Amino acid sequence: MPEIPKTSNDRLLSLDFYRGLTMFLLIAEFSHLFSYLVSPDLEGTFIYALGEQFHHVEWEGLHFWDLIQPFFMFIVGVAMPLSFAKRMENGDSYAHLSKHAYLRAFWLLILGWALYCIGPGRIVFRFQNVLAQLGVTYILAFWVLRKSPVIQIGFSVLLILISELLYRFFPVEGFDQAFVAGENFGAWFNILISGKEDGGHWAMFNAIPTAAHTIWGVCAGQLLLRKSSDKQKLQVLFLAGLLALIIGYGISPLTPIIKRISTSSFVFASGGWSLIALVICYWWIDVRKNQRGVWFFAIVGLNPLFIYLFAHVGGANLIRDILLPFSNALFAWIGELGAAVVLSLLVLFAMWYICFWLYKKKIFFRI
């Protein structure tokens, strides 16, 4: 078993696992595995019901898959104070950290935007993916990094409130239906920026309310750095997560949970689940020291930028094309659907192995 980083001031094994599991699920989407789980041949089965949880809700509601992006944006926030604390221990000034933060946000935005330009072969102004949204949420979180928790949480709630008010009271005719797909402020903002509405009604403006996820991650990371006991840390994180869940689901009759436009109820509910997931990982891995097998996902978490870009620019499809003839020859006997599932698992394992190889060679892609 490969060696994995020890828990320290700048790195938590539970955080690497949390990040790695989230990235593993993201790249699993590119293996097409989740598509096969909802094959018509499986309709009415437990596997089909499970597979639905790995697809976004069409509009109102919440599936597990709707939590993956909030998880990652929250994880980035948790890592910020840990990373910056280590940099300052090594002598970096706040001015240097500020320059690094702005450059990182800039490159996240550029990389996220550039992914939309690959297929069309022309410049496309879209900013809905994880990287582009992080380019905004990262810098908003950095602005309050050195503020008190009260100011940090207050700022995050203000961002959510601004979004809520814009959707509810936007005065432009045709875009004044707060929670109707294609007829709300988010659709208008998409048209303003890119010239057209997104086909899936994903709003670019989501980066503003979901900055709360990254800011709440910063709060959690700063709490984990404190000298208080693990029990106290877990209690605070759990209660914060529980409160966010109560608020999110509690206001859902008034403001429906809609990920595609990141309604306030969605931000609170998904933020609550993000906190609870951190509690579980931290308690199980760093407090209880149950670390067997954790390295499998942690390795993916050490190269998240690379594997995300690799999958998006066609790396998964290239691997699929290479493996397809061999998979057909070896597994055709189990049926078309079975062979397709096996191929997806092989593609997923190949992407994991690339991360493993990079880890063994100590190659890490960062900005």
Image (cartoon, helix red, strand yellow):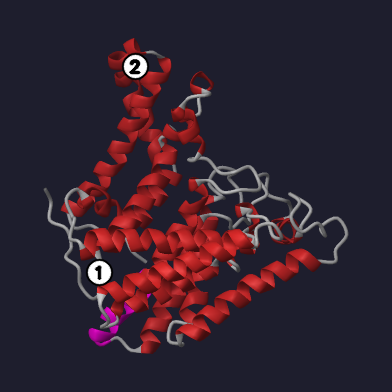
State yes or no: discs 2 and 1 in contact (Cβ < 8 Å): no
Q: Main secondary structure of the magenta part?
A: helix
Residue 91 horizontal side relative to residue 132, left or right: left
The numbered dot on residue 171 is none
Q: Is residue 234 above or below residue 119?
A: below
Q: Determine which quarter of the picture holds residue 229.
A: bottom left
Asked if residue 84 lies in the magenta stretch, the reply is: yes
Q: Is residue 276 above or below residue 300?
A: below
Quadrant location of the C terminus? bottom left
Of labels 2 and 1, the one closer to you? 1
Asked if residue 36 lies in the magenta stretch, the reply is: no
Residue labelled with disc 2:
328
Q: Is residue 304 above or below residue 319?
A: below
Residue 302 visible in rendering: no
Place of residue 166 in the rendered image (x, y in percent of width and height, measured from the top left) = 74, 68
Residues packed near mark 1 inside 10 Å, few (<14), some (14 to 19) or many (20 plus):
some
Place of residue 172 in the rendered image (x, y in percent of width and height, measured from the top left) = 85, 63
Kindly identify the residue that appears in the image at 22 percent across and 65 percent down. Answer: 287
Residues shaded magenta: 79-91
Q: Earlier in the sequence, mark 2 or mark 1?
A: 1
Q: Determine which quarter of the picture holds residue 113.
A: bottom right
Query: Which of the two residues, 83 or 115, is positioned nearer the viewer here?
Result: 83
Residues packed near mark 2 inside 10 Å, few (<14), some (14 to 19) or many (20 plus):
some
Q: Amino acid at mark 2?
A: Asn
Kind of element beneath mark 1: loop
Kindly identify the residue that appears in the image at 30 percent across and 59 percent down. Answer: 281
Residue 330 visible in rendering: yes
Residue labelled with disc 1:
11
Q: Amino acid at mark 1?
A: Arg
